[in-house]
Image (tube, grey):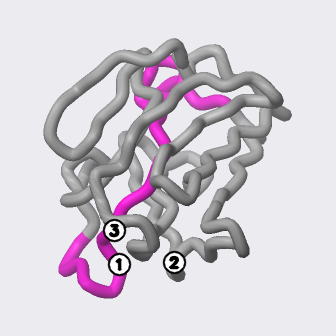
Amino acid sequence: RVSGAQGSCVLISDSQLQRDQVGMTAFTLLVTVVSAESAAGLFSCGVTTTAPHRLQALPEVAEQLANAWLAGFDGSTWDGKTWGLCDWDPSTLVSGDMVVVSISASNVMHVSVGQALKAQLQLDVPPGTPLFALV
């Protein structure tokens, strides 16, 4: 986010995540600064099948994007239709934390901080569907 910006922001990768030989893909976020919004449970990360070039405009919040799977918030998951619970509360993130979002060949999304698994969510798309990082 631009220094000094207020409110929510949405980030979608400009190209699809590349899967390796076994069908797995991942991206990593390095926490450099913790804002009041993220400390209040307003941070989430995951993936979407929506390519950014197909959007007229970005939504105000990531969960408004069609075909999005997210974890974080205040200990919640979003599968594009319903809210669920997870053990991860991103308000505990500190500068220097590495957040890894990985998707298995069978489309199970895992969110880890350091080496600790924090959330798991099944993606409701066929294996091999193009995915884009979503924060």
Tell me which amino acid carries mark 2.
Answer: Gln
The quadrant of the picture occupied by the N terminus is bottom right
| Spatial CA span between label 2 and label 1 | 8 Å
Q: Which residues are magenta?
A: 34-57
The outermost residue toward the left is 81
Q: Nearer the viewer, residue 125 or 96?
A: 125
Q: Does the magenta run of residues contain 37? A: yes
Q: Position of residue 65 (x, y in %)?
A: 23, 57
The spot of residue 26 in percent (x, y) is 65, 57
Residue at 59% in and 36% down: 111
In screen coordinates, is 16 left or right of 130? right
Q: Which residue is mark 3?
A: 49
Name the secondary structure under disc 2: loop
Secondary structure beneath disc 3? Answer: loop
The residue type indicated by label 1 comes to Ala
Closer to us: 102 or 4: 102
Q: Which residue is mark 2?
A: 16
Label 1 belongs to which residue?
51
